[in-house]
Amino acid sequence: MATIRNFAFLAQLRSEASSHIIRYRGGRVKQSGRGLVFWFRPETASIAEIPMDDREMTLFVKGRSQDFQTVSVQGTIGWHVVDPERLAERVDFSIGLAHGRLQGEPIEKIEARVSGIANQAVLQYLAQAPVRALLDAGPELLRDQLAKALAGDPALAEIGVASVSVRLTNLAPTSELERALQTPTFEALQQKADEATFERRALAVEKERAIAENELANRTELARREKLLIAEEADNARSRAAGVAEAGQVEAAAEAERIRTVESAKADAEQQRIAVYRDLPPAILLGLAAQELAGKLETIEHVNVTPDLLAAVLGEFRKAPAPALTAAG
């Protein structure tokens, strides 16, 4: 904004470099340029101040797609002045000579013209395709078409204004339609999530089954080994029993052989002793028996001698020959 200082019948204007100042006197341009400083007479001058910096305006358009669905477009449009003198002729940028402020609202008029051109271009673009195609294409294609429409529209060129940038931040349907459009995607994602969950569960079940089968196989193998161990222990026990029996048989055979040997020796000795006694006369045998009996009298408590036995003994003595000593006498 220009700064004006008044001194009686004269005034001084000082402007910024970003503003183009045009001073008129008598309907003609007396001075025109950026960042001017000059003296003037307020009663004979008319001054316009045109901003030369880049300006941005907000864009918000609601339109209908080819399938009659509401779509909202949001963004910003940048513009600037390329011919300030032409713009000053078409739009009032006069400033008050007492305070230096704009007397009207020229910026709003320019932005209204830019917004009208942009809205028309956006509405035409939205009406050319169904909402699904618009959303799939995204805002980039619309941005390019909107930039071309603003650059080629003569309504801006004839007032000395040009667009410098177009940025779109959103191209979206209504919230209800957006939820409806998102439903298939959500369902597909949910289905994939369910499938992944089922796969994880199936994998877990398969792992549990494999673990159970492994445990069963281990138990079966242990049972088989235990059976083999029991059979081997039984074989060992039978082998030990057979060994013990065989050893017993050998020992019994040896003992029997020893007994047979001993008994055979005893029998032989008895036979020899009996053979010695067999040739002796009965009287001598009786004497030997009496002698053996006399040797055991200490252990014999009583002896029964019957008359028959005594008669037999005496008979035997009578039958015996007289001793040689008697014959000699």
Image (cartoon, rainbow, N blue to C red):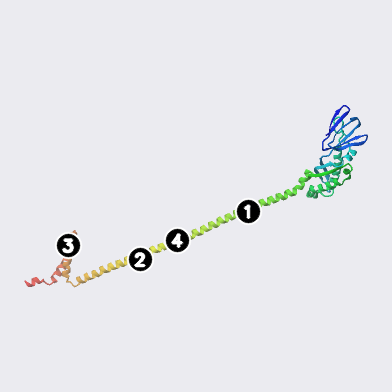
Task: Identify residue for label 1.
Answer: 203
Marked residue nearer the N-terminal end (2 or 3): 2
- Quadrant in the picture for residue 58: top right
Task: Identify residue for label 4.
Answer: 234
User: Which numbered disc, 4 or 1, marks the residue closer to the eye?
Assistant: 1
Residue 250 circle label:
2
Q: Find numbered disc 1 in the image and state the secondary structure of the residue it sits on.
A: helix
Mark 4 is surrounded, within 10 Å at the Cα level, by few (under 14), some (14 to 19) or many (20 or more) other residues, namely few
The answer to whether residue 43 is left or right of residue 306 is right
First to last magenta residue range: 291-295
Q: Residue furthest right?
A: 26
Residue 11 circle label:
none
Q: Find numbered disc 2 in the image and state the secondary structure of the residue it sits on.
A: helix
User: Which numbered disc, 2 or 3, marks the residue closer to the eye?
Assistant: 2
The amino acid type, in three-letter code, at marker 1 is: Leu
Quadrant for the C terminus in the image: bottom left
